[in-house]
């Protein structure tokens, strides 16, 4: 049995049936990760990983991902493992693990280390002064996207079967698109261990990066199953997260002309991104789904409100003056501007984002999914982002203008490739109703089956 050729679903099945041991699977992925040439990992922990694998091999399989390797994003605390948050000024050795890490452990995961992230996850590209650049496997000149770029690169390079990430503005979907894999962001509150309530604006949720739709669903389901408690205020069903076995006819809207960042920057959609959406729309229509255009009303003040909350979250990071001096330009800009905010300004921004949430959810009413490009442009060179922090932020908006509003609305979203040119791909984003992951998984699995490298034809000169 070739471990590297197995999907994560197949791998976990083989682990549960004892066809494979956790030790041999963990050794396989550690060996792959030791030859990391794309900057996916900031640290490997082979001794801890193998000790954990031996422990799991001694007990009956219980959790959904019993014995399966993954790695923690370097924003998540794991007891006894260094956490840098992608920064030169931090090197925590926590004594307790974050709830998401504990939930994955309860589901049977084996962590082999930490995956790269930009400083505190505040960028759509994974580059830092602490750890360097994370690149697309096979393309050392192209960035892997962010902020879960290390996780995406590790999965794309076969160094992990799947990996957890976090997503506050596109941080799972953007690197998934850059690396040509699947990224699943669940509904706000679907995963109790990191519900979004811990971040101002409720923007951040955990998500999964994987090579198939079913693999991503399995990892998110493991996050849910491993969580010890649910918050009573969150109404998402605790049901299984699986690709539906009996497909339904769905209503899919194709979002056109929507530019939430237009007040601060133009975000034209490239020909490659349009090609990915057109390929997906045609494929879904051919599968019998109802596909039609949908519009979202203008969101006045969106950019200012989102930026206000983004900066406020940065300013809330505990730090010493010495740590502040070591911050990178983008993070320091966000922290310093955030410290200038008044309580009234923050409350007004929260109210504005709630109004935008109502407008977005209302515009999508009656639809099972909404289709957009995940990124407006192909993967960006590692030196594409300006050093100036404001210009850097605007460049991020130009690259991925359609991801952050999904976090504001708390909706689930799935990113997967549908268009190829050579070895690179472009991805679409399917956005669902609150708690509507089942429709996204069905549609994603259909696109995965129909849209393969080589079809549809790529326009000349693209990528």
Image (cartoon, helix red, strand yellow):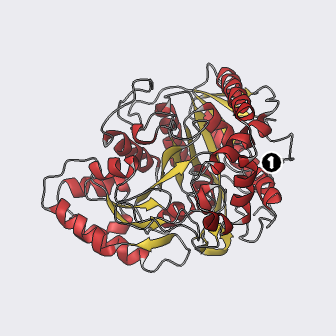
**Element marked by disc 1:** loop
Where is residue 201? Give x, y as percent. Answer: 61, 36
Identified at 47% across, 63% down, the residue is 155
Q: Quadrant of residue 305?
A: top right
The relative height of residue 450 versus residue 25 in the rendered view (above or below) is above
Where is residue 117? Give x, y as percent. Answer: 56, 62
Image quadrant holding the C terminus, namely bottom right
Q: Quadrant of residue 324?
A: bottom right
Image quadrant holding the N terminus, namely bottom left
Farthest-out residue, front: 321
Total labels: the figure holds 1
444 to the left or right of 3:
right
Where is residue 198? Give x, y as percent. Answer: 51, 40
Q: Nearer the viewer, residue 331 or 44?
A: 331
Residue 260 seen in the current view: no
Q: Nearer the viewer, residue 12 or 459?
A: 12
Q: Nearer the viewer, residue 267 or 181?
A: 267
Identified at 82% across, 30% down, the residue is 300
Where is residue 261? Give x, y as percent. Answer: 80, 41
Identified at 53% across, 37% down, the residue is 443
406 to the left or right of 459:
left
Q: Residues within 10 Å of mark 1 (few under 14, many from 20)?
A: some
The relative height of residue 102 versus residue 194 in the rendered view (above or below) is below
Q: Nearer the viewer, residue 201 or 364?
A: 201
Residue 20 seen in the current view: yes
Identified at 72% across, 50% down, the residue is 400
Q: Which residue is mark 1?
A: 269
């Amino acid at each position: 049995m070739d471990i590297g050729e197995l999907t994560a679903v197949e791998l976990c099945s083989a682990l549960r049936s004892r066809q494979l041991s956790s030790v041999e699977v963990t050794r396989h992925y550690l060996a792959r990760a030791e030859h990391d040439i794309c900057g996916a990992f900031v640290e490997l922990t082979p001794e801890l990983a193998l000790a954990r694998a031996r422990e799991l091999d001694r007990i009956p399989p219980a959790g959904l991902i019993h014995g399966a390797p993954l790695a923690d994003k370097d924003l998540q605390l794991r007891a006894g493992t260094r956490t840098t948050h992608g920064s030169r000024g931090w090197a925590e050795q926590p004594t307790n693990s974050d709830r998401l890490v504990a939930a994955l452990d309860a589901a049977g995961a084996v962590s082999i280390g930490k995956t790269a992230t930009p400083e505190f996850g505040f960028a759509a590209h994974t580059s830092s002064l602490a750890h360097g650049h994370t690149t697309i496997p096979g393309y050392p000149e192209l960035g892997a996207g962010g902020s879960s770029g290390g996780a995406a690169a590790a999965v794309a390079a076969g160094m992990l079967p799947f990996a957890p990430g976090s997503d506050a503005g596109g941080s799972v979907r953007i690197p998934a698109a850059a690396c040509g894999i699947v990224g699943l962001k669940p509904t706000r509150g679907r995963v109790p261990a990191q519900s979004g309530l811990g971040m101002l604006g409720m923007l951040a949720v955990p998500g999964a990066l994987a090579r198939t739709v079913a693999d991503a669903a399995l990892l998110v389901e493991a996050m849910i199953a491993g969580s010890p408690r649910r918050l009573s205020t969150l109404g998402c069903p605790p049901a299984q997260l699986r690709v539906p076995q009996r497909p339904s006819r769905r209503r899919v809207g194709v979002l056109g002309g929507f530019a939430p960042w237009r007040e601060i920057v133009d975000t034209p959609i490239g020909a490659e991104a349009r090609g990915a959406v057109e390929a997906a729309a045609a494929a879904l229509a051919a599968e019998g789904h109802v596909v039609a255009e949908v519009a979202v009303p203008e969101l006045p003040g969106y950019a200012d409100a989102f930026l206000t909350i983004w900066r406020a979250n940065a300013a809330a990071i505990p730090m010493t003056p010495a740590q502040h001096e070591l911050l990178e330009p983008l993070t320091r800009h966000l922290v310093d501007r955030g410290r200038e905010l008044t309580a009234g300004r923050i409350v007004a921004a929260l109210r504005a984002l709630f109004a935008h949430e109502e407008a977005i959810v209302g515009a999508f009413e009656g639809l099972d999914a909404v289709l957009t490009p995940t990124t407006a442009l192909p993967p960006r060179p590692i030196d594409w982002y300006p050093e100036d922090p404001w210009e850097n932020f605007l460049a991020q908006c130009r690259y991925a203008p359609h991801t952050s509003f999904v976090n504001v609305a708390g909706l689930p979203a799935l990113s997967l490739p549908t268009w190829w040119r050579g070895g690179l791909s472009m991805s679409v984003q399917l956005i669902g109703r609150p708690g509507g992951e089942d429709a996204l998984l069905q549609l994603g699995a259909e696109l995965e089956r129909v849209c393969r490298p080589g079809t549809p034809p790529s326009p000349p000169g693209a990528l």
